[in-house]
Amino acid sequence: MRIHTEALTDEERTTYEWQMWIDGLGEDGQRRLKGATALVSRCGGLGGPLCYHLASAGIGGLILAHAGVVQTADLNRQILMTHDGLGKSRVESAKRRLLELNPRLRIEAVPENVTEDNAGALVGLADIVFDCAPVFAERFAMNRACVEQGKPMIEAAMFEMEGQVTTLIPGKTPCLACLYPEEPPAWKRQFPVLGAVSAMAAAIAAVEGIKLIAGFGQTLAGTLLYYDSRNMTFQRIPVARRPGCEVCGMLCDEVGRAEDGVGTTRQSDRQERSAYMPTAAGRPSDTNRCRSSC
Amino acid sequence: MTVTLTYFAQIRRKAGVESETVTATDGTTVHGVLAAIQHGAEFGELLFEKTGALRPVILLVVNGLPSTPERMLRDGDSVQVFSPVAGG
């Protein structure tokens, strides 16, 4: 797996000592975490705790994309927000809280939701994407950009006391459009949810991303993990690519193997990537198009 | 034959039940069994398009494995019906 790695400081070795004892993670995995940048779409009930876990695990950079200001009804689940922050920028609140935990974290706070217009650019800045968005149009935009750029996307969702997580790797697993070929007509932006339930999905998604970046363990690639916390049951459902998918159907299976699941981020690439420019358009990559041998 | 239906997320709320056992003719398809369920118009709208086809966003799992609406059921089968959910 080609991924940018960064050397650890003595403080980082001390901070992450207990997790570096984990078989398969170790210092090498920790260096990979430090070298990785994740895009998190929305930092609310799902994205908030997820960012917290990524920050505490020592990820190198986070791009937080979330428009709007903190509202009272956010505070049952959006644990990066504060009562004092009511009426203020969500991403700025999230950034401040995350830096309190991990001041070494590189954070780009983007006060925009992901759209078809900015998805390419935002995904282009990251090695891995976490979909924590409540709106399917937003999720589809990220999905398409991830497929075009060969970036993995950890997909997390919840409703009431239920939740689900899966890891999407272009060309290897279904993409989001394989699972949902159209925008669900009945899905509403506001839905019943308990903060701890979304935090469950967030923690699972964080673990998935950490495993993928650090290169150990078995991910949920090709599996939808579903849980019902009313009775605390968990279920693994195999999911497959949909033939003829209009988003990922042109990808060969050889693209985006699980062990290469994270997009390459070489030092030269990182230096060329500037901060997110709201007017920049994402450029699709042609490196993962199906070759004539497919 | 007797099959067990289990609903999730919004479908569960509209159905008003988490799970139910239904009786149908041997070989009835998943679509056929679901089409016969009566839990109100909103339940039906969640599952079916106006053409009567099952919405492609509905995930069907029969005996633990993804399935299709055309799958013919057997006595004792377990059918789980998942509606799409997002984050937030």
Image (cartoon, coloured by chain):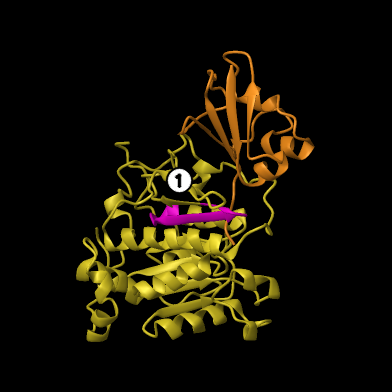
Q: Nearer the viewer, residue A216 or B22?
A: B22
Q: Position of residue A40 (x, y in %)?
A: 48, 66
**Figure colour of chain B:** orange
**Residue extent of the magenta highlight:** A146-163
Residue in the picture at 48% in, 54% down: A155
A67 to A200, vertically: above or below: below
B30 to A245, vertically: above or below: above
A242 to A105, vertically: above or below: above
Q: How many residues crowd mark 1 within 10 Å: few (<14), some (14–19), many (20+)?
A: many
Name the outermost residue toward the front: A231
Q: Position of residue A127 (x, y in %)?
A: 37, 64
Q: Nearer the viewer, residue A89 or A3?
A: A89
Residue in the picture at 50% in, 41% down: A178
In this figure, which residue is indicated by the disc labeled 1?
A224
Mark 1 element type: strand
Q: Nearer the viewer, residue A70 or A162?
A: A162
A45 to A110, vertically: above or below: above
Q: Amino acid at mark 1?
A: Leu
Q: Is residue B55 left or right of residue A167?
A: right
Q: Position of residue A260 (x, y in %)?
A: 28, 54
Q: Which chain is yellow?
A: A
Q: Is residue A100 left or right of residue B56?
A: left
